[in-house]
Amino acid sequence: MNNTHTDKLLITPMEACKLLGVGRTTMYSWIKNKTIPVVRFPHCRNVYISVDALREMIRENTIISDNGGGCNE
């Protein structure tokens, strides 16, 4: 991940979009479906994503291919 975000414990959904290279709709769909856990503080409308949780999600969804990678090979 980008060094500007590794010092942060929490990032915004839009920062997570940029880091993962996905769109806003995809990110908020993942949040709604609880694919990515969020942090909410009392009396605050904003949601945040734990950088550690994002790394864990990436680890859990990493697939090691036997065919050398690529699509439809």
Image (cartoon, rainbow, N blue to C red):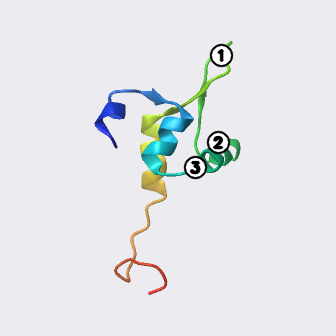
Q: Residue at x 57, y 49 (%)?
A: 23
In this rendering, which labeled residue sits more in front, label 2 or label 3?
Answer: 3
Disc 1 and disc 2: Cα gap in Å?
A: 17 Å
Quadrant of the snapshot with the C terminus: bottom left
Q: Which residue is mark 1?
A: 44
Disc 1 and disc 3: Cα gap in Å?
A: 24 Å
Q: Which residue is mark 3?
A: 23
Mark 1–mark 2 CB contact (< 8 Å): no
Side (left or right) of 63 relative to 6: right
Which label was assigned to residue 55?
none
Q: x and y percent of residue 49 in the render?
A: 53, 33
Side (left or right) of 25 relative to 53: right
Looking at the rendered structure, the secondary structure element under dot 1 is: loop
Looking at the rendered structure, the secondary structure element under dot 2 is: helix
Q: Could you tell which of marks 2 and 3 lies nearer the N-terminus?
A: 3
Q: Residue at x 47, y 55 (%)?
A: 60
Q: Which residue is mark 2?
A: 31
Question: Residue 27 lies in what quarter of the image?
Answer: top right
Neighbor class of circle 2 (other Cα within 10 Å; few <14, some 14-19, many 20+) is some
Mark 2–mark 3 CB contact (< 8 Å): no
Q: Residue at x 46, y 49 (%)?
A: 20
In this view, the residue farthest toward the bottom is 73
Neighbor class of circle 1 (other Cα within 10 Å; few <14, some 14-19, many 20+) is few
In this view, the residue farthest toward the left is 3
Q: Amino acid at mark 1?
A: Cys
